[in-house]
């Protein structure tokens, strides 16, 4: 697998990788901040191109390195390449009246569900890592973290109406 880089004055930097199968992948870091990715299969005369924003390029890089993040509306699941059996889910919820007036300590969320509340958003204020004495109000948006089954238990135990 050969890798080379070329400075292209006025354009940016080109990185070109030739795979063991003789396919070519070229990445251009453009002066405008965008990234272009070209692929040329060894058996094709025509390359294909995708232009990515820096954020899209980082996401693709994370996928290629194994640190996969899959989003589904208000949740994210993270898998770490170095810890292949570890998958962490992060999800947002809105607290209902059943939790209003009760503290984190009162609700015993971690003990009952295994999930952990890592942030609360109330109006225009965000509370990161709320203390056990934090008292919920109806409509608080919370960020919970845990394994997928722990978050499912959180939903069943604390968000039933």
Image: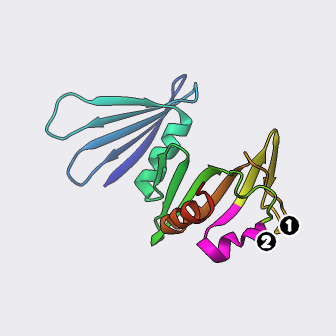
Q: Which residues are magenta?
A: 104-117
Q: Earlier in the sequence, mark 2 or mark 1?
A: 2
- Characterize the local packing of mark 1: few (<14), some (14-19) or many (20 or more) Cα atoms within 10 angstroms: few
x%, y% of residue 126? 80, 48
Question: Residue reaching furthest right?
Answer: 133
Q: CA distance from mark 2 to mark 1?
A: 6 Å
Residue tagged 1 = 133
In the visual, does 41 lie left or right of 151?
left
Residue 82 to residue 12: above or below = below
Please identify the dominant SS of the magenta region: helix
Q: Nearer the viewer, residue 120 or 27?
A: 120
Secondary structure under the numbered disc 1 in the rendered image: loop
**Quadrant for the C terminus in the image:** bottom right
- Would you say residue 108 sits in the magenta stretch? yes
Q: Are marks 2 and 1 in contact (CB under 8 Å)?
A: yes
Residue 107 position in % (x across, y down): 73, 69
Q: Position of residue 71 (x, y in %)?
A: 48, 47
Residue at 53% in and 52% down = 76
Residue at 58% x, 24% y is 32
């Amino acid at each position: 697998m050969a890798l080379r880089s070329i400075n292209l004055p006025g354009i940016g930097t080109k990185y070109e990788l030739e795979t063991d199968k003789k396919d070519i992948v070229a990445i251009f870091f453009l002066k405008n901040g965008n990234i272009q990715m070209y692929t040329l299969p060894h058996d094709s005369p025509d390359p294909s191109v995708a232009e990515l924003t820096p954020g899209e390029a980082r996401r693709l890089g994370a996928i290629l390195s194994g640190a996969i993040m899959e989003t589904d509306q208000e949740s994210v699941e993270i898998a770490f390449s170095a810890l292949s059996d570890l998958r962490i889910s992060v999800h947002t919820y809105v607290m209902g009246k059943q939790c209003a007036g009760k503290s984190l300590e009162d609700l015993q969320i971690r003990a009952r569900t295994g999930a952990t509340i890592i942030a609360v958003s109330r109006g225009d204020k965000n509370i990161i890592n709320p203390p056990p004495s934090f008292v919920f109000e109806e409509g608080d948006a919370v960020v919970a973290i845990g394994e997928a089954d722990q978050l499912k238990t959180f939903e069943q135990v604390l968000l039933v109406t």
